[in-house]
Image (spheres, rainbow, N blue to C red):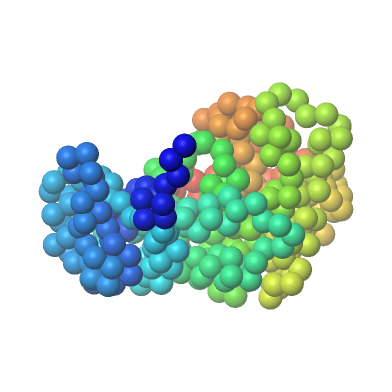
Amino acid sequence: MAVLSRAARPVSYFPVSPVMLFPEALGDFSVYLWQGGDFVLYTRSGQKFTLRHRQSLHSNGVNEVYVRSSEKAQYEQYIERNLGSILLDESLPIKLRSRVFYEASAVVMQDVFDNRLPTALRARHFERIAEIVKSSIKFLASDNTLSTVAPFISHDYKTYTHCMHVFIYSVAVFQTYGMSDTEIFECALGALLHDVGKAKIPRRILNKRGALTMSERAVIKEHPVHGVSMCAHLPMTQNTINCILFHHEKLDGTGYPAGLKGDNLPLPVRIISMADVYDALTTERPYAEAIPPYEALTLMRHDMRQALDMVVFKRFVAVLSGADMI
Ligand SMILES: [Fe+2]
């Protein structure tokens, strides 16, 4: 059998949305177009992208450009380096910035969650996540942002997209409670990382179709504690840890891992729990169909009124309806 030499090994590429070619940003990776059955060089590594590049792609109906897989790390660093300034650049349309926010967060979160984390969240991953939170909080705080981000919220369940959704909803509600910038940052970080402990749960249990056995359910219930232990070496405050550890607690004390009750549950945790339940209900999961927003909220109000904070629930509904999401 012939063995491919290193030089002859086929080159692989991954698709990228042209919106990620930020005007005036320097890309230290090359960009290719798919033309006539082959990859054709569009911009070289070290070349600045310009508005003209993007307009030309747009006017030619190009929806995807490509980057070599060997330059994936450079691409990801480029996204993170530029995200903060892009999101706050008011000369760019809010719809475009919303898409950039969603796609850039997805790049980071997918990388973190798909790399089956061994025992701990690596400091380098943590720094990337903290940067995303820092870059996007101000953006998510501006008026109408939630409604422009909403169309990107996918209804296919993946742990990393679920974490992003809970983060988006929670930040929108945090703003309405007049929390300080520091508290919002710490709790937003907790919202984005709330399910990180699921990286330690076997996929056959996480993705099982049909009912879980008692012992499988017990394994799943360990994920908040796993999450905290995976982050134990990182510079996190108690606010962030509370959000990870207690997001499955319920007001009536029937939640886990500690069975906390009532006032013992901090407000940001109640908000994250609300967003968590809502996103789970409105998203397609391996074991359940997605249900429409209005039905999900009705179910939460009728069947979960002992478990969820109904004052926070009203605020949550107001935020969603303000964004035309119901
Ligand atoms: Fe969870």
Residue sitting farthest toward the top: 210
Give the x, y percent position of residue 290. Answer: 56, 30
Residue at horizontal 23%, vertical 70%? 47
The residue closer to the viewer here, 145 or 243, is 243
Towards the viewer: 19 or 44:
44
Task: Please identify the quarter of the rendering in which residue 34 is found.
Answer: top left
**Can residue 298 be spotted in the picture?**
no
Q: How many marks?
A: 0
Instruction: Note whether residue 197 is visible.
Output: yes
Q: Is residue 301 above or below residue 33?
A: above
Q: Residue at x 78, y 62 (%)?
A: 229
Residue at 33% x, 70% y: name it: 28
Q: Position of residue 203 (x, y in %)?
A: 69, 39
Taking 237 as reference, is 14 left or right?
left
Left or right, 100 with respect to 274, comes to left
Residue drawn 53% across and 68% down? 128
Left or right: where 31 falls relative to 246: left
Tell me residue 207's x, y (percent).
66, 34
69 left or right, relative to 49: right
Tell which residue pokes out farthest to the front in this image: 1
Given residues 102 and 178, the one toward you in this image is 102
Residue 314, horizontal then vertical, whole percent: 60, 46
